Image: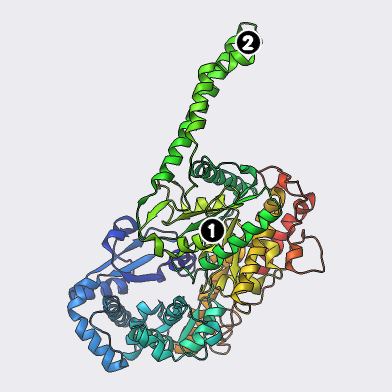
Amino acid sequence: YTVIRTKAGVSVDELKDHYVLLGPYNEHCCRTELEYGEPSNEALQRTVQAMRSAGCKVVTGRWLIEGYPNVVLFDVGTSAHRLDEFKHELWEKAHIGIPYHDRESNDAIIFGALVAWFLGEFRSQLANLGDDPASVPITAHFHEWLTGVGLILARCRRLPVSTVFTTHATLLGRYLCAGHVDFYNNLDKFNIDKEAGDRNIYHRYCIERAAVHCSHVFTTVSEITGLESQFLLKRVPDVITPNGLNVVKFAALHEFQNRHAMAKEKINRFIQGHFHGHYDFDMDKVLYFFIAGRYEYSNKGADVFIEALSRLNFYLKEINSAVTVVAFLIFPARTASFNVESFRGQAIVKGMRDTCKQIEQDIGNRMFELCLQGRIPEGKDILRQEDVVQLKRCVYGTNRTHLPPICTHNVIDDSKDPVLADLRRCQLFNNRSDRVKVVFHPEFLNSSNPLLPMDYEEFVRGCHLGVFPSYYEPWGYTPAECTVLGIPSVSTNLSGFGCFMEQHIEDPASYGIYVVDRRYRSGEESVQQLAQFMFDFTQLNRRQRIILRNRTERLSELLDWKNLAIYYRKARLAAVSATHPALFKDSVREVGGAGVGTGKGPSSIILSRPLSAVASPMGSRASTPHHSNPGSDDEGDTGTGAGAVSSEDEVDEDAERAELSSRSN
């Protein structure tokens, strides 16, 4: 969904109104996201009208997102009475049977049949209008197994349509990894049919595999998913189509640093309330780490993250570090309500803040009156006894006899919750002596949250490091979003993002992209490596972290759809060349750039180490910004990027940006 939504802008720029999105009709979403209207293309109008005349509800209009693309939405409910007919055709032509009780698969069959019907009708209407199928190709791009039935039926009906199928994660791979198997070391050893059958997804797997083999061009989002597809789906991807984002560049390079400071201040306020009574750490030496995503505990690497936090806590206590790390874990879990203690803490601190502001205002007024009378204010004239009493009441009100909570909500059946169970096992209880504090927020963030009123993007901007040590992550939008926002992140060589960065950057760590080896190292070694990465990051002073954020933000151009959309263009052209070779004449395989249909991934762009990085014969760890001297934090200027980095970085900043831009293009 994120891929299609964010890519729509560049797709419309390229294809204009020839780009049409097909999807299921959801009335609730359409109320706020769709501008209803009839299509301007005559063949499209006739196609929609023909389907409506046959009793199918078809909604058309414009999606209210960047690009304003045309959409055609099918209400699967109005065609549910034809489910048995569609199932019969799928069985007769593809020998794929679907159980009656699998509602999701039933909906996928109805939707797929409607898409195939639409494609066939659209081709017929084009012919009626005089367009020659041989000279006017139609390309249909199907995403994920849920759309696969449409592709299968289109090929079985021999529709003159060029097809592309993209899997963003293999169905069986996700299930296998969730079962805690040694997945990547046994890819060639799995009995695929048996594994799918044991998990009651054999029919879904058959749809996915049939769609993969029926498509003219098969693509995946990363090299690691391509390897997975080779063994589980028995086809090597023709094109690798990495995922991108819409990157917004600020006119002033330091603007994203200013936004980081403002967002961090909001998080600071939450932390002050959450840890009231145990607020004995310096906020200028607090670092915010976070992990977020779907609650796939082991797939997302939450187990490795918690274990590494425990090691980091030990390291920081051993060296008597003044740095405090607050680690947020944001996964949606089943909850009953907010934790009362969390709300109480925020209320207490808000009361103290309001009291202090009122006393501050009163003191200012008294000072002004005394000076106006020609008197020099003294201590007893400025801070009165009643002010001291009020402050004492506020201070005594912050005392608590128990530790700050590790969870902001009351989790249902919390004794079995994997995050809480591991936090207890590692004894991360937010003790005073702990240098690593934890906050489990079992709900996605939004600005209407009464406890932490921040959107996810704003929260990410306010953090210092995103940690995503995933075991199964075909791409990984969370570290990509961190990069675009200028926040360093930790990924793995089992995620598409981590592999992409290792492929395109000579030394990712020098740009704030730390890649944990979870493929060729044991679990214990991966935990140690992650703990070391985080420890090294805590040893950077503020000025060095600003330099690192500047470098990370420069990588955003690598992830911009304006640069990555070319791989989708290659896939489309390769599909058209397979069905309409006459249109391409001599150089069929070179259309759209090298690598079309070759199975190779993105072209080999290697971004060298930053020009401002200190030269060293050692590896990645030594090429990160220099560690701070003991006792030095060099506060610098938190609001600006240029004013807070060394002169060397200032001189080379434009050169690095130009180098990155030229290589990514």
Q: Is residue 372 left or right of residue 510?
A: left
Q: Residue at x 73, y 67 (%)?
A: 620
* Pick the front one: 302 or 293: 302
User: What color scheme is it?
Assistant: rainbow
Q: Is residue 662 above or below residue 601?
A: above
Q: Amino acid at mark 2?
A: Cys
Looking at marks 2 and 1 on the same chain, the residue that comes earlier in the sequence is marked by 2
Which labelled disc corresponds to residue 427? 1
Q: Is residue 360 above or below residue 306?
A: above
- Few, some or many C-alpha atoms within 10 Å of disc 1 (few <14, some 14-19, many ≥20)? few
Q: Is residue 649 above or below residue 217?
A: above
Residue 613, image quadrant:
bottom right
Assign a secondary structure to mark 2.
Answer: helix
Which labelled disc corresponds to residue 371? 2
Residue most toward the front?
A: 401
| Coordinates of residue 594 in the picture (x, y in percent) | 61, 81
Q: Is residue 86 left or right of residue 656?
A: left
Residue 133, image quadrant:
bottom left
* Pick the front one: 259 or 175: 175
| Coordinates of residue 252 in the picture (x, y in percent) | 63, 47
Q: Amino acid at mark 1?
A: Gln
Q: Residue at x 77, y 61 (%)?
A: 611
Q: Is residue 665 visible?
A: no
- The N terminus lies in which quarter of the figure? bottom left
Assign a secondary structure to mark 1.
Answer: loop
Q: Residue at x 65, y 48 (%)?
A: 254
3D distance between C-alphas at marks 2 and 1: 56 Å
- The C terminus lies in which quarter of the figure? bottom right
| Coordinates of residue 438 in the picture (x, y in percent) | 53, 54
